[in-house]
Amino acid sequence: MKNMRRLGYVAGLLGLATVIALVIHQGWSTIFSAIGHAGWRLLWLLPFHVLPLLLDVIGWRVLLARRDPHRQATIPVLFWIAAIREACNRLLPVANVGGEIIGIRLIRWRGIDSAVAAASVIVEVLLSLVNLYLFAVLGMVLLIELTHSISIPRSILLTLIASLLVPVVLIVLLRHGKVFSRLEIFAEKLLGGRSRLSKLIDGSRLDMEIRILYGRPGRLLVACIWQFLGLLVGSFESWLALRLLGYPVSVWDAIAIEAVTQALRQLNFVTPAGLGTQEVGLVLFGNMIGLPPDASIALSLVKRMREITFGVPALISWQWAETRKLRTEWRSSTSPDLSNTRNV
């Protein structure tokens, strides 16, 4: 775990150095002049981001609906949890998995069974991988159509094809294997018997809940559609930001560069916030549709400002909720002792 964290820090520093080098190379004055031209109008990106995130949440709720008969996980609650998950994965060095673990913990607070909560998050993440692949393919097709060429770098095409193996293998393993049961056994052997961690995994129940979700293809399809709509709507952030920066592009251009850049960022999951990867991707693919490099970097910086402005309050609310819960648990644990003291 420590080695993974160190790798994240190193990758983050290298990514930050790449961003700084690109800004200096393209001319920081031109880039920040474009951002200054947009000014306070860029704040429109904050309420706009609510829509794609909400579409993702609706898809997540579809997966939870049957296993949450009392509707404890409402759309507003799931939206709050989804905002925290996104903020953790994009702003913290957690290799794009820390947010999901926190999300499972927060759903359990609503009285949802831990295996049900974990299964919904795991399947939702798997569907998001499938959707990201489909979205990337759509982006590639649009780039070829818009540029009237097939000059997309071969290395990127090969990487995209190879990455298809990841969701395919995961789908097969989770559908037919006993992945988490075996992880539970491995944890017991590693830790020398049952431990708090191995009890938390409860592999057999988690495998069963995942298979229950697999047995409802209609729900999986509906959740997948909501997620894909979220990706499409999210690409309008690039369209709006570029218009505000003074570089108007078509809707198809915005979808194309958003799709392929998101795919690159997902592939480089080790680097926190995709530092460097997002900037290089936007410069590379933006150039293919005639977008100047300084405009691509300005777009990337604006998207990062939106991530920070939207994500930091979510992280603060999470810490506030954690603190409040700890205080409640501490009071409940000490209240019997106080009552016994009074009786004496």
Image (tube, rainbow, N blue to C red):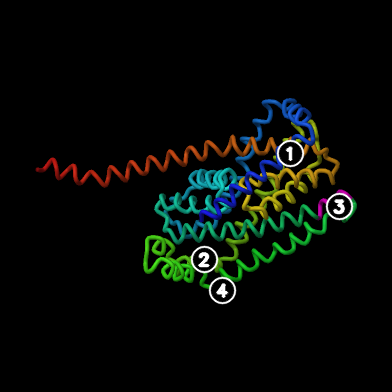
SS for dot 2: helix
Q: Is residue 273 left or right of residue 177?
A: right
Q: Position of residue 170 (x, y in %)?
A: 60, 66
The residue that appears at 44% across and 57% down in the rendered structure is: 69
Which residue, as the protein is rendered here, is positioned at the far bottom?
176
Q: Amino acid at mark 1?
A: Ala
> Dot 2: few (<14), some (14–19), or many (≥20) neighbours within 10 Å?
many
Nearest to viewer (mark 3 / mark 1): 1
Magenta residues span 141-147
Q: Is residue 64 left or right of residue 258?
A: left
The residue that appears at 59% across and 37% down in the rendered structure is: 308
- According to the image, label 4 marks what residue? 176
Mark 1 and mark 4 lie on one chain; the one further toward the N terminus is 1
Q: Is residue 1 left or right of residue 300?
A: left
- According to the image, label 2 marks what residue? 210
> Front-most of 318 and 223?
318
**In contact (CB < 8 Å): disc 4 and disc 2:** no
Q: Amino acid at mark 4?
A: His
Q: Which mark is residue 21?
A: 1
- According to the image, label 3 marks what residue? 145
Q: Position of residue 18 (x, y in %)?
A: 71, 42
- Cα–Cα span, label 4 and label 2: 10 Å
Q: Amino acid at mark 3?
A: Glu
Mark 3 and mark 2 lie on one chain; the one further toward the N terminus is 3
Nearest to viewer (mark 1 / mark 4): 1
Mark 3 and mark 4 lie on one chain; the one further toward the N terminus is 3
- Cα–Cα span, label 3 and label 2: 39 Å
SS for dot 4: helix
